[in-house]
Amino acid sequence: MIINSIKLKNFQLFQNQEINLDKINLITGINYDSLEEENSYSSNGSGKSTILNAILFGLFGEVTDINLKDLISFGAKEAEVSVALSHNNKNIIISRKIPAALTITQDGKEIQFNTASIAQKYLNEVFGSDFQHYRTYNLIDNKKGINLLDLGITSLRKALMDFVNEQFVEIRKNLLAQKLERETYNKDKRLYTYYLSDRRIEIINAGLDEIKADFLKFQKDRDVQNGIVSQLNGEIESRKKLIYFREKDKQALHVGVCPILKVKCSKLEEQLIPINKAKEEEIQIIKGELKGYQDQLEGELEMLEYYNAIIKQVENRERKARECLLKLKEAQKFAAYKYTKEDVQLYADAIKILDSFCSYYILEWLTNLEIIINDLLKGLNLAVEFNAEKDFIKIVNNGEELNYSQLSSGQKKFLGTIFKIGILLQEGIDSGLLLFDEGLGDIDLVNFYKLIDILKGLNFQCVIIYQNCPKEIKDVNYINVERKEGTSKCG
């Protein structure tokens, strides 16, 4: 992949600018809005870094430590960056806007994607990197990038180990999962030593269905019986009330007692005798009916008690069946407990072998990285050596062994740049785009020329910010940025 040009519209300091890129591109700048001394202008704020921001935004839709809305030029409503690149003999144009809009064309035809995330995934495959990986290994910067050597020995060791280990993480993760499964489903841990089939559960479920059917039947009969009992109770109460009132009427007559004079009267007694007899006969009839109702009620109550007892028995049967089914299902879980101690140990040993191989691979990986870095540094009287000791990395400068902390700031930046390139080459990434934003400011001109010579010998396309560099380097595309009255242009 190589970027041929980028177009900026209302992007930070640039209103409308097209910038052509070559293999090695050197950006310098001057800010005429900033007068430090008479006829002395600063390069700070000229817009050099804006070009790198535009490239990052165009490729990934992200810029480190800057909100996307802050990338829009003051007073404008939207910004746009178009990146024209060549990849596998195809011409691709990425047009990205703020607010969010992404269009990708290939050989003049727009590629359709269902979502922006799918489109970005496609671009990541083209670039061979996502934004975080690119920021870590392809961006050399004091602030926005990561200088691995500046992390310190402990963090550097961890970063390199993680970088190498990620190739084994998935394998180890799978082995651990298999080991955990065998530990969990070890035969020694199961509570039931026999196999319980699904057929047994089907039989118990069928029995439960029969029990439920019986329960519903007896419950229905009990409800009918409750209705009969309730009706009989009502009729008995009615007869009792009728007897009560007849008795009251009978007592009120007081055979032969005049209701006005309140004295016994023979004439009245003769008239009341037939009435009392009729009342007595009616009371006896009602009492007979009442006796029949009470006898019938007792029978119905016995029947109701029978149904209640049957229902209780059915409920007990259902409870026992459910308990049995629950135990059966619990026991059935142990059908998966089929592994032995030997199965567990097999995966434990496999993990140990993998870890051992990983350690060996890491040492081999570091050895190869050491060879690549030293090949890049040949002729500079500078070499690195990795080891398993506490220091982890040693630098040999003109035959003198040094720790990283003993290097000058320029040497650190130079070595940090070579270190990142070495990691990319070690991983088989021998092409792509490298961005240098203020990351080389501490490197003197002599070492800067040496770095350019190294970069020329590689297949990487480079966009480099290095201020005050004489225009005498061959095969380098110079991009001069000038800022005047708040607007930047490339001269």
Image (tube, rainbow, N blue to C red):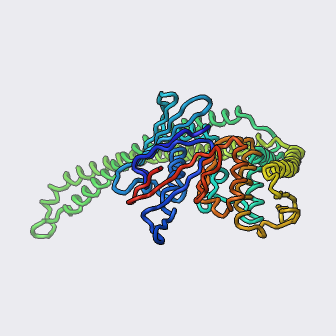
Asked if one can make out residue 254 in the rendered structure from this viewpoint, the answer is yes
Residue in view at x 83 percent, y 57 percent: 383
Vertical relation: 120 (above or below) 465: above
Question: Which residue sits furthest bottom?
Answer: 37
Seen as rendered, the residue at the extreme left is 260
Could you tell me residue 256's position as x and y percent? 17, 62
Q: Is residue 272 above or below residue 345?
A: below
Residue 193 in the image: state x and y as whole percent.
82, 43
Q: Quick one: 334 or 155, which is closer to the camera?
A: 155
Q: Is residue 159 above or below residue 4?
A: below
Q: Is residue 340 visible?
A: no
Q: Which residue is drawn at the image coordinates 82% and 49% (left, top)?
A: 375
Name the residue located 86 percent from the left edge and 45 percent from the top edge: 350
Q: Position of residue 80 (x, y in %)?
A: 43, 45
| Residue located 73% across and 48% down the image | 454
Quadrant of the frame with the N terminus? top right
Q: Is residue 395 left or right of residue 303?
A: right
Q: Is 42 or 67 nearer to us in this picture?
A: 42
Q: Nearer the viewer, residue 10 or 476?
A: 476
In the picture provided, is 345 more to the left or to the right than 412? right
Question: Is residue 90 shown above or below 283?
Answer: above
Disc tally is 0
Residue 330 lies in quadrant: top right
Tell me where residue 488 sits by quadrant: bottom left
Q: Position of residue 271 (x, y in %)?
A: 14, 55
